[in-house]
Amino acid sequence: MAGYYYPARAQPLSEALEALLASAPAPDPASATAVVLPHGSFRHCGRIIAATLGRVAVPRRCILIGASHTGSAMRWSLMPGGAYQTPLGAVPVDEAAAEALRARCPFLEPDAWAQRGEHSVEVLLPFLQRLAPSDLAIVPIVTSSEEPEQLRQLGEALAQVIRLQEEAVLPIASAELSHEKPVERARGRDEETIRAICALDVPRLTRLTEEDGASLCGYGALAAILQAATALGARGGTLCGYGTSADAGGDPDSAIGYAGVLIR
């Protein structure tokens, strides 16, 4: 994914991150219960990722749930070990946390192959490498499931595993909003979706998704993370940035919506 979604060499990538973070609002040192981030290219939504993560005290341990784009037949893929690689270096898997989640959610298939080439996780990693401590470790999960019981079970498991840790863990939903809509229609629908996310209202998010077909990319990730955040005591979300692919020069008749939300 390096080269298409973000610069493929370490120095240009570091320079791009510095530029994006320099233009973000002043950082807030408070921790977050969870965050929602888009997974488009740096050109399309890097400023939104920066405006969101730039406000967070990113811990060394993060759990990322992203939408599946690779065509894998697996509804769930959890990477149980190994590492993701970016031009800034390797990001190892938190094996203990991954195993704790598997023990609570048997449907999480331990298969790293299903994540090869999956940008919904990878595109966020350079930001985490820049903002988190140097011993960053992640639990990457990729899903195409919209099964309510599985999403509820994963949300509860995430909350349980995070509560049991002796240090902070940041759960991250990697999701995008409207897909392939005229830009004004996309913005209108995205406003409704963002209100549901900020209210931690999973039933409302589900209804909007059902009304709009497959437009939302990452419903499963959002539903699981919002339920986990609620179980962890979060009261709501704050929109940190929003834009569309049309704002970055894309086709205004076929726009994608991007939003960054900080949940506390």
Image (cartoon, grey):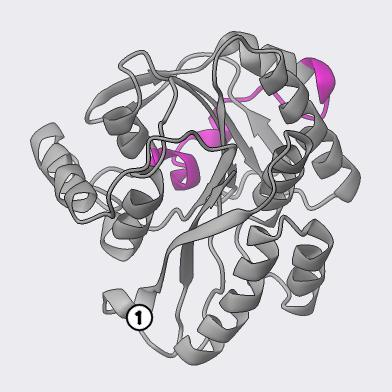
- Where's the C terminus, which quadrant? top right
Q: Residue at x 14, y 33 (%)?
A: 10
Work out whether residue 74 can be spotted: no
Instruction: Tell whether position 122 is magenta.
Output: yes
**Residue 28 appears left or right of 214:** left
For the view shown, which residue lies furthest in the right direction? 149
Mark 1, residue position: 246
From the viewer's side, name the closer residue of 263 and 7.
263
Q: Is residue 228 above or below residue 45?
A: above
Q: Is residue 56 above or below residue 108?
A: below
Q: Residue at x 64, y 18 (%)?
A: 98
Instruction: Tell whether position 232 is magenta.
Output: no
Give the image quarter of residue 60: top left
Work out whether residue 110 can be spotted: yes
Give the image quarter of residue 87: top left
Residue 217, image x, y percentages = 60, 61
Residue 205, image x, y percentages = 75, 65
Residue 84, image x, y percentages = 41, 25
Question: Bounds of the magenta span?
Answer: 103-124
Q: Which secondary structure, mark 1?
A: helix
Q: Residue at x 51, y 82 (%)?
A: 187
Residue 141, image x, y percentages = 61, 34
- Where's the N terminus, which quadrant? top left
Q: Residue at x 20, y 56 (%)?
A: 23
Q: Mark 1 belongs to which amino acid?
A: Ala
